[in-house]
Image (cartoon, helix red, strand yellow):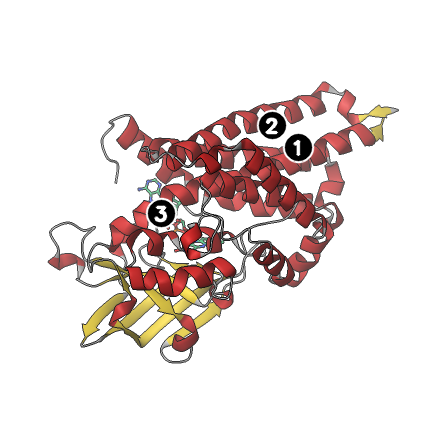
């Protein structure tokens, strides 16, 4: 474990840096974007210029060489400010597939540019309309043709594709009915979307209940160089799984930030709002839900940073990462429901930002992995119950 990663002073300083930066992007900034369904370009630029998106990239490739605790703290603070890191969090961790499984040439070529933000690597194309959570049933196919692969198929919910230069793509390279294990025959590619757009790759935005630049992507005989393949052909499913614990821990940290913001907002409103000649927060029916949400968030926080520490130490952390994501997403949703209720009718008014956060934090029980699948993981892999699917 790196001593730098463990240093609480470095984490505290990072948190302060993010808090200071986020003061220039108050909730009104996010509210405006939400109305317009616009991408937070200025915020992403500010975070990039501050070097905050390259923290997980080793120093030899131009990053800060910090660990997951640092990345989690950064994302938590963005959310605790009332903002949302969905537009940029993937720039932090999608490169992990290249870092862990890429060739030395791929790492030299891409990681320094991702670290300084000159290349945006934040599109991750796994989910498909017909396969859903059953990832090994994806049908997007990459056929080897000399020095190239030819790709056909469709992805859905590929977020940030319009704001990314590269995409990590999971595709079949051997049909499912020709492999002995369904997790085999899947491969990972790093697709240069700057060259691919209009040449076989089409991106279509999906309008959603929250401001999340998500899209569907169509591949129609897209030709990419064979050296876009990451690692070994056919082993891609394992590579994707390797990155999932990190992603779950980081998303859980965002939920912690949402919880903190929502609880703070409810506390302030409950102290200020007077009905029946007293602050509404004097009523136990109002204050207990706030206290309960706080306790839930506190418990979730212990699991998130425990999982991050285990990940950093290179220890197995599937159980911890999944439980952290489960508890943190449930805590933030409970906090959102509580905060809306505490605000009464005003909770529905856009200018309070509560309804926005309510919509935003609901996502985490579905993406990047739904609650049922986490429970299935815990049931099967932790408790030894029979596999249910
Ligand atoms: C805003 C947004 C952004 C996203 N960004 C990305 C992205 O960048 N890249 C990407 O690849 N994907 C992305 N996703 C996709 C996301 O990971 C999936 O939506 C999520 O994993 C759930 O898959 P699904 O929507 O296909 O649901 P389905 O698999 O269709 O499942 C529907 C429901 O049934 C439940 N279910 C299904 N099977 C079982 C079972 N065996 N047991 C119990 N319950 C079950 C699920 O839990 C879920 O609640 C995004 C999704 C959203 C909404």
Q: In the picture provided, is 193 more to the left or to the right than 73?
A: left
Q: Which residue is mark 2?
A: 293
Q: Which residue is mark 1?
A: 263
The residue at the point 45 percent across, 41 percent down is 67
Give the Cα separation between the discs numbered 2 and 3. 30 Å
The percent coordinates of residue 373 (x first, y second) are 35, 40
Report if residue 189 is visible in the image: no
Determine the image quadrant of residue 173.
bottom left
Q: Secondary structure at mark 2?
A: helix
Report if residue 85 is visible in the image: yes
The residue at the point 72 percent across, 52 percent down is 24
Determine the image quadrant of residue 148.
bottom left
For label 3, the crowd category at 10 Å Cα-Cα, with few meaning under 14, some 14 to 19 and many 20 or more, is some
**Quadrant in the picture for the N terminus:** top left
Task: Tell whether label 1 touches label 2 (CB within 8 Å).
Answer: yes
The residue at the point 57 percent across, 40 percent down is 76
Q: Between disc 2 and disc 1, whose residue precedes?
A: 1
For label 1, the crowd category at 10 Å Cα-Cα, with few meaning under 14, some 14 to 19 and many 20 or more, is many
Of tags 2 and 3, the one toward the viewer is: 3
Q: Between disc 1 and disc 3, whose residue precedes?
A: 3
| Disc ID at residue 243 | 3
Determine the image quadrant of residue 261.
top right
Q: Is mark 2 within 8 Å of ligand 1?
A: no
């Amino acid at each position: 474990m790196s001593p730098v990663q463990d240093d609480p002073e470095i984490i505290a300083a990072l948190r302060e840096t993010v808090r200071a930066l986020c003061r220039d992007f108050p909730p009104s900034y996010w509210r405006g974007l939400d109305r317009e369904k616009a991408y937070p370009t200025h915020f992403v630029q500010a975070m990039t210029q501050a070097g905050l998106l390259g923290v997980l990239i080793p120093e030899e490739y131009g990053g800060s060489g910090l660990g997951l605790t640092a990345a989690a703290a950064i994302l938590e603070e963005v959310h605790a400010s009332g903002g949302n890191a969905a537009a940029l969090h993937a720039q932090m961790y999608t490169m992990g597939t290249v870092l862990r499984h890429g060739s030395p040439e791929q790492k030299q070529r891409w990681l320094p540019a991702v670290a300084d933000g000159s290349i945006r690597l934040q599109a991750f194309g796994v989910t498909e309309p017909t396969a859903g959570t059953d990832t090994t049933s994806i049908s997007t196919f990459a056929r080897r043709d000399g020095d190239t692969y030819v790709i056909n198929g469709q992805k859905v919910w590929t977020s940030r594709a319009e704001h990314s230069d590269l995409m990590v793509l999971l595709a079949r390279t051997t049909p499912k009915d020709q492999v002995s294990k369904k997790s085999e025959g899947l491969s990972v590619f790093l697709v240069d979307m700057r060259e691919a757009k209009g040449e076989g790759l089409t991106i279509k935005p999906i309008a959603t209940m929250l401001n999340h630049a998500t899209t569907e992507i169509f591949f129609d005989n897209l030709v990419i160089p064979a050296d876009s393949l990451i690692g070994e052909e056919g082993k891609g499913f394992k590579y994707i799984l390797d990155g999932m614990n990190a992603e779950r821990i980081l998303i859980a940290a965002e939920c912690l930030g949402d919880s903190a913001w929502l609880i703070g907002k409810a506390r302030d409103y409950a102290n200020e709002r007077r009905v029946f000649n007293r602050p509404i927060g004097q009523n136990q029916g109002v204050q207990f839900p706030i206290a309960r949400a706080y306790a839930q968030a506190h418990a979730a926080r212990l699991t998130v940073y425990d999982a991050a520490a285990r990940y950093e130490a290179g220890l197995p952390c599937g159980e911890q990462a999944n439980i952290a994501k489960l508890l943190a997403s449930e805590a933030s949703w409970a906090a959102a429901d509580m905060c809306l209720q505490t605000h009464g009718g005003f909770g529905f008014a856009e200018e309070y930002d509560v309804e926005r956060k309510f919509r935003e934090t609901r996502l985490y029980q579905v993406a990047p992995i739904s609650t049922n699948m986490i429970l299935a993981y815990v049931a099967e892999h932790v408790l030894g119950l029979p596999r249910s699917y």
